[in-house]
Amino acid sequence: MSSIFTGVLVTEMLKLAPSPEQAAALLATMRACNAAANQAANVAFQHRTANKITVQKLCYYDLRYAFGLSAQMAILAVHKACGAYKRDKAKQPVFRDTGAIAYDPRILSFKGRDAISILTLDGRIIVPIVYQGRWTQGPENRIRGQADLVHRDGMFFLAVVIEVPEPPAGDEPEGWMGVDLGIVNLATDADGQAHCGKAVRAVRRRNVRLRAKLQAKGTKSAKRLLKKRRCKEARFARDVNHVISKHLVGKAKDTGRGIALEDLQGIRDRLTVSKAQRADLHSWSFDQLRRFVTYKAILAGVPVRLVDPRNTSRTCPEPECGHIDKRNRSTRDDFRCIRCGFAGPADHIAATNIGRRAAVMRPDAA
């Protein structure tokens, strides 16, 4: 009987170091697989079906002979096309010639922890791994399922999902550190420490202006600069979220507390904001920050609970009061209870209420 995995799944980008000949073989394979996926997507769109078995029967042999693919590569190309078409059946999917392609254990294997054997159109090649990530931090860390070969900025990466076992459960936390997530302050904890989002918003707005300027210019040099900067903002936001999540988890672990977060699923559909604030709301990576906090907390043995965020910033935190009223928060930054007069920073009040809600919640049965 197979054991049940209890831990966290972490996506790692393993950097590969192919030789020039190997890099050319990998690129040729990626182009062939994506061209095959485009042809399979055309078949799926014409027959109005996202069923993998049906599409495979219609185009399997054509893909193998037209693009020189192995059997498993042709099947994975069909799966990629059907998966994309299933997400949006209103249009035919189109894949970039160097888009990521999937590899499963039949056509990719690991040679220890510093090399892979990967199938190309010219046969298998052994490619060294430069960066192994969390995979090397413990013999119990295992790669799960298939991997994606990614070509980015002239470099090759292997995106893999790694099983990292959860540390043994300790004692119940001594309390819960509530964390309020927001746009002005990306995160504010129940101790009153705020991580300001001013720098992130400034970078985003500068990038918006720069992109508009370069797109309007339309010269070759402008297009080169746009291509060079296309992922810079995402990397910056990701780094900020990593720093904040690491700080929150470290603080909770040092003080023996769990972390209470707002359950913000569907917030973009629930909130209505002015046109000027729309860009900030829809570029706000709160879900990424929450995911970073969650998996870092699991690895550190810190429990996490999600609570209902409704009225957390409108509820008086005084135990003998607890009055809820929209007028308690007269401005975005300030809270003042209209019944008892208790006042303080609104984000700090919300984080305090989030922590208290987690303390009275029943733990999940799972």
Image (tube, helix red, strand yellow):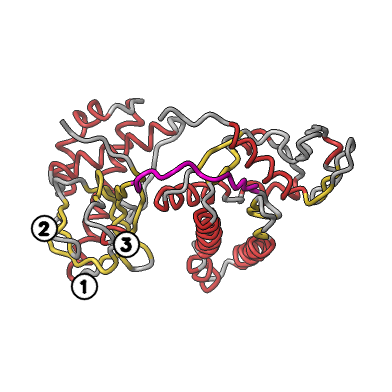
- Say whether residue 91 is left or right of residue 311: left
Q: Which residue is mark 2?
A: 124
Give 275 or 166, whichever is nearer the viewer: 166
Say which amino acid is labelled 1: Pro
Distance from disc 2 to disc 3, alpha carbons, whole Å, reads 24 Å
Question: Which x, y percent locates residue 204?
Answer: 63, 61
Q: Earlier in the sequence, mark 1 or mark 3?
A: 1
Question: Which x, y percent locates residue 333?
Answer: 80, 51
Give the foreground label among 2 and 1.
Answer: 2
Q: Earlier in the sequence, mark 2 or mark 1?
A: 1
Q: Which residue is mark 3?
A: 133
Q: Residues within 10 Å of mark 3 (few under 14, many from 20)?
A: few
Q: Which residue is mark 1?
A: 20
Give 305 or 271, whichever is nearer the viewer: 305
Q: Is the N terminus in the top left, top right, bottom left or bottom right quadrant?
A: top left
Residue ID at (60%, 67%) = 214
- Give yes or no for contact between labels 1 and 3 (Cβ–Cβ under 8 Å): no
- Give yes or no for contact between labels 2 and 1 (Cβ–Cβ under 8 Å): no
Magenta stretch bounds: 166-181
Q: Which disc is residue 313 wearing?
A: none
For the residue labelled by badge 2, is the local secondary structure a helix, a strand or a loop?
A: strand
Look at the image and say whether residue 172 sits in the magenta stretch. yes
Give 220 or 302, whichever is nearer the viewer: 302
The image shows a total of numbered marks equal to 3
Residue ID at (51%, 51%) = 256
